[in-house]
Image: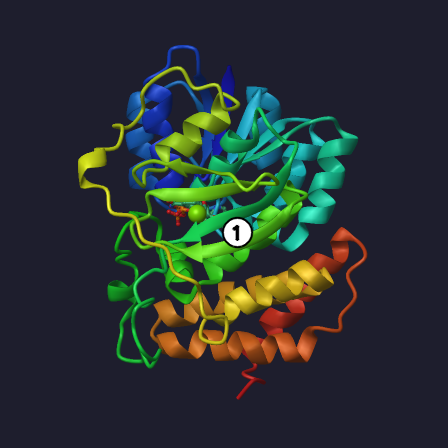
Amino acid sequence: MKILILGATGSIGLQTIEVIQKFQEIELVGFSFFKNIEKAKNILKIFPNVSIFSKHVKTLNSCDSYDELIDKTKPDIVLNSIIGFAGLDLSILCLNKKINLILANKESMVVAGKFLIELANKNNVSIIPVDSELSSVFSLTNNNKNNIKKIIITASGGKFFDKENLDESHYKFNEVIKHPKWNMGEKISIDSSTMINKYFEIIESSYFYNNEIDVIQHSEAIVHSIVEYLDGSSIMYLSYPDMKIAIQNAIFNFDSKKQIINNLNYDKLNLNFNKIDENKWLPIKWAKDFLINKNLSQPIIINASNDYLFELFKKEEITFNQIIPTIEKTINKFINHKISKIEDVYLLNNLIREWLKEKKYE
Ligand code: NDP
Ligand code: MG
């Protein structure tokens, strides 16, 4: 099976390289990276003959575009593990080329899930999510899609869940990226602490499953999802928090044959669950609104402002506790925009970035 990784130098990309090394039947045929030449060189030491592409770094043998990279390597599957809105172009490109997509870039599903699912169906290819929660729901529902009452995904709650109030202005970027349970890339670690990551996953879930969706807080990050059945029973999916399970499941279409992480030590298990206060954690309220209204502009607004504010927080131009109130102002300003085709997604995304750049929210 030939696999191509877009965004190989990131957290998910590098964990996928680890998984690939364990299987002779998977062949890495190429990868893209953005700026991190050192990590790209490390991958090339392990796989010297693969094709590469980077917009910023050109070497003798590199391809000139994503198009060329895909056409030259002819992969059976592509993993899109790019961060943020930039991943959308590539999800569209792969589906247009009729290639099965393994999607870690949840942002592209969040902003354009409707259009991506339509495109995948039209071209008869699949989209499989690489996210512990969504992947676990796929595993749980693989054999029994009937009689499901509700799907519940868990939220570890990030760094600040137990704090009484959210006046976290003194926290610096480098502190907030240290997630208590998961070792992840910078942006998703910040998104976890604001609960925006859970917003994304609820929106994404609404495109993958036709069931009622709910969320519950679970600090230990051992239970990733729960499927409730009509008869009153439920099935939980448990594993240590390690993305290699979701990556392997996506590559082998939920038919994994090899042990990739340790089984749980049940003696030591202590599992706790809490209701999430939607008035304190607005992204959960926004997600519930979306599930009811299906207003396609809302996820685009939230993703665009979140991408932009992440960059400002990283540069220390805003504080952590300015992120959510600024997103709220952006929602109020743009919520009535109509989205009827994929071009509208790009237009609204750009409009919001411009608006934030001019600091019109102040
Ligand atoms: P990272 O920031 O660690 O990696 C991002 C990758 O994208 C890098 O290879 C980077 O290249 C590349 N990249 C960055 N900007 C651009 C751009 N503008 N155009 C093209 N490539 C770009 O992110 P993660 O691996 O943490 O996350 C990737 C996706 O997976 C996200 O959507 C995230 O939400 C999702 N995800 C991540 C999890 C995790 O455990 N990390 C868990 C579940 C989902 P370079 O490094 O060379 O600059
Ligand atoms: Mg997740």
Extreme-left residue of the structure: 268
Q: Quadrant of residue 174?
A: bottom left
Extreme-front residue of the structure: 231
Residue located beneath label 1 in the image: 201
Extreme-bottom residue of the structure: 362
Extreme-top residue of the structure: 24
Q: Would you call the spot at circle 1 few (<14 residues within 10 Å), some (14-19), or many (20 or more)?
A: many
Mark 1: C-beta under 8 Å from nearest atom of ligand 2: yes
| Colour setting | rainbow
The location of residue 354, given as percent across then percent down, is: 61, 73
343 relative to 236, above or below: below
In the picture provided, is 47 more to the left or to the right than 29?
left
The location of residue 77, given as percent across then percent down, is: 56, 24
The answer to whether residue 85 shows anywhere in this view is no
Residue at image point 34% right, 34% down: 15
Residue at image point 27% right, 28% down: 263
Residue at image point 37% right, 63% down: 193
The answer to whether residue 333 shows anywhere in this view is yes
The location of residue 316, given as percent across then percent down, is: 33, 74
Residues 308 and 109: in front is 109
308 relative to 189, above or below: below
Q: How many marks?
A: 1
Q: Quadrant of residue 59?
A: top left
81 relative to 172, above or below: above
The location of residue 239, given as percent across then percent down, is: 33, 36
Q: Which amino acid type is marked by label 1?
A: Glu
Q: Secondary structure at mark 1?
A: helix
